[in-house]
Image (cartoon, rainbow, N blue to C red):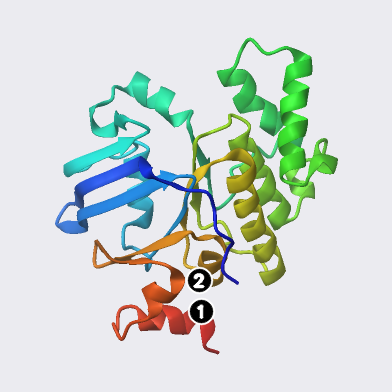
Amino acid sequence: MEKSKAIINYDKAVIDVDKVSKSFGDRQILHDVDMQLFEGENLVVLGRSGTGKSVLIKLISGLLKPDSGTINVLGEVVNDLSERDLMKLRLKIGFSFQNSALYDSMTVRENLEFPLVRNKRNLTRAEINKEVEDVLEGVGLLQAINQMPSELSGGQKKRIGIARTLILRPDIMLYDEPTAGLDPITCLDINTLINEVQERYKTSSIIITHDLACAKMVADRMVMLLDGRFERQGAFSEIFDTDDERVKPFYDYNFIV
């Protein structure tokens, strides 16, 4: 099932990766890559393990610096920013991690309050409560507000992790393997939530995944990293309409029993 058409501003790139290369020792991970994420778009990045997908996200967020090339995020050249300015920019970028990154010793409410209180110190208790309840309602888990992470299923933890990211109202969402380790039904729920987040919160998102069912369901556009370069991009059918032996096994693993 491919996703419905989103409202995307193709005249405005919120992320622009221009001729970026990155190596670790003698191993070159990214080779002169170009990539754009447009306002309102869900962009899926496909590729085998070790091809540089997670490195790309770390470069975009300033956690790593490129060896060459430039990365522009929301009008800022990430390579040139001070640590203080990077921290400000990161408040506009939401990270959804594979493991949900919840604090086990905190309730769901406390997990969501933590980034809010830390970054918006002038909020009243009533305003904090409203923000927490609104974002939990947005991911369909208001009833879990007083539960501990240990009481939640894997899918629920994933939703709460996304809610905690959304509470600062980021412009950009970065999802790292959002369906990893989940059963097929829960995967469908998370894919639906990613699309709902795009529509409700007007986010622009990069979704890193190996899961082609996820990719097909959430992507407005896909790019595929092959040998450190974005060799293919477009809709699902365009990506996989090929005899390229680097691409076919990726499709076969996901869809051929």
Crowdedness near tag 1: few (<14), some (14–19) or many (≥20) residues, C-alpha within 10 Å? few
Residue matched to label 1 = 254
Q: Is residue 80 left or right of residue 197?
A: left
Residue 74 placed where, x, y %? 37, 33
Q: Is residue 214 left or right of residue 105?
A: left
Can residue 107 be seen by looking at this rendering? Answer: no
User: The N terminus is located in which quarter?
Assistant: bottom right
In the image as oriented, which residue stretches furthest toward the right?
Answer: 143
Q: Are marks 1 and 2 in contact (CB under 8 Å)?
A: yes
Quadrant of residue 227 within the rendered picture: bottom left
Residue 15 placed where, x, y %? 35, 42
Can residue 224 be seen by looking at this rendering? Answer: yes
What's the distance in space between the residues labelled 1 and 2, CA to CA?
6 Å
User: The C terminus is located in which quarter?
Assistant: bottom right
Secondary structure, mark 2, is helix
Q: Is residue 17 left or right of residue 182?
A: left
Q: Is residue 50 left or right of residue 158?
A: left
Residue 185 vertical placement versus 75 (above, below): below
Name the amino acid type tagged 1.
Asn
Secondary structure, mark 1, is helix
In the image as oriented, which residue stretches furthest toward the bottom?
Answer: 257
Residue 126 placed where, x, y %? 79, 16
Name the amino acid type tagged 2.
Leu
- Marker disc for residue 212: 2
Quadrant of residue 244 within the rendered picture: bottom left
Residue lying at 74% horizontally and 18% vertically, measured from the top left:
127
Residue lying at 43% horizontally and 68% vertically, measured from the top left:
235
Residue lying at 58% horizontally and 31% vertically, measured from the top left:
169
Residue 107 placed where, x, y %? 76, 35
- Marker disc for residue 147: none
Residue 99 vertical placement versus 72 (above, below): below
